[in-house]
Image: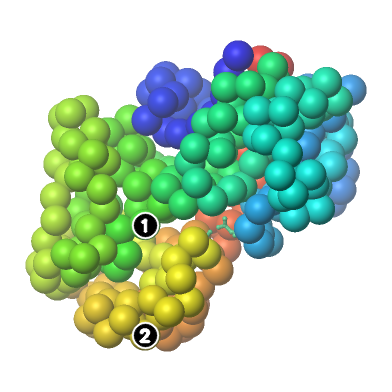
Amino acid sequence: MTHFLDIHKTSPEDLRAMIDQGIAMKQARGDRPKGAPDDTQPLAGRMVALIFEKPSTRTRVSFDVGVRQMGGQTMVLSGSDMQLGHGETIADTARVLSRYVDLIMIRTFEEETLLEMAEYASVPVINGLTDRTHPCQIMADVMTYEEHRGPIKGKKVVWSGDGNNVCASFLHAAGQFGFDFTFTGPPQLDPEGEWLEFARSKGVQAVIERDPVKAVAGADLIVTDTWVSMHDPESAKERRHNQLRGYQVNETLMAHANPDALFMHCLPAHRNDEVTSAVMDGPQSVIFDEAENRLHAQKAVMRHCLGV
Ligand code: CP
Ligand code: NVA
């Protein structure tokens, strides 16, 4: 069974093959209409369940469109509409769904839910974001960096802000793809030590630098994300803003990075909180390519899981 649960649980060779396949499939499609099928239909006859226990725009639409372009069918399920949201166990849900569908993508809260789904499903399970990680996002981000600037190996990526689920998957990618990673943010919001250790164990630099200006020196890519994630309590908002104000990505901060540094954000963004509109809409920003590449990278992830 080939699940896609996290970047650090997938081999560097498989990750590389998925990135390369995503780029090749994107190029092969050219500019044909979004609803037009791909030339090859590797998901013909396959049914894919997309389960959401949290809101989503990009993950929901990109998976749905990607399956259809490859000839498969989808059903989008909201956790609260399923018996899963009313007391049925994850294990029973996994075993039942496996009798109807060929692949499950789930966006959920606790990582435990994802892991239990994968343990009891007899079909592959893909992580569409948990409180702890967001691997599909970083596949798209690596693909986007390489499309614009060539190999990410050996580059310096700087994360400014909350050391959250997206930051965690970036640290995993640093280890697996071989790039250096600097986190800059307040100590209360550091990424988990385990993730820093993972990257270091693969021989790359994974460091914390409290001063954002020092952190971005020599950076090839600057990344941020919302200051308050979907799993964070609403009550955290004011405190987070106070803690993170100094870590906003703005034109002044960008000017301290390498002149050809790119800017990324997984979106949705809170304009003029974690990043200014000037940066989001500026020449170094690749945020909409990043969003598009969710589609192409995930198509490769699904083919990898299904072995097609
Ligand atoms: N980046 C991302 O996962 O976006 P959605 O929450 O819209 O799916
Ligand atoms: N860190 C954000 C990512 C959204 C795609 C969240 O979990 O809400």
Q: Is residue 270 above or below residue 155?
A: below
Q: Which residue is mark 1?
A: 164
For this rendering, which residue is in front, 224 or 156?
A: 224
Instruction: Identify the image quadrant of residue 38.
Output: top right
- Circles 1 and 2, Cβ within 8 Å, touching? The answer is no
Q: Secondary structure at mark 2?
A: helix
User: Is 190 displayed left or right of 269 in the figure?
Assistant: left
Question: Splitting the image into four quadrants, where does ligand 1 fall?
Answer: bottom right
Q: Which residue is mark 2?
A: 238
Circle 1 residues within 10 Å: few <14, some 14–19, many ≥20? many
Q: Amino acid at mark 2?
A: Glu
Circle 2 residues within 10 Å: few <14, some 14–19, many ≥20? few
Q: Residue at x 59, y 26 (%)?
A: 118
| Residue 55 shows in this picture | yes
Q: Is residue 170 above or below residue 38?
A: below
- All told, the count of numbered labels is 2
User: Residue 16 at what x, y percent from top left?
Assistant: 45, 27
Q: Residue at x 41, y 26 (%)?
A: 9
User: Residue 50 at what x, y percent from top left?
Assistant: 74, 42
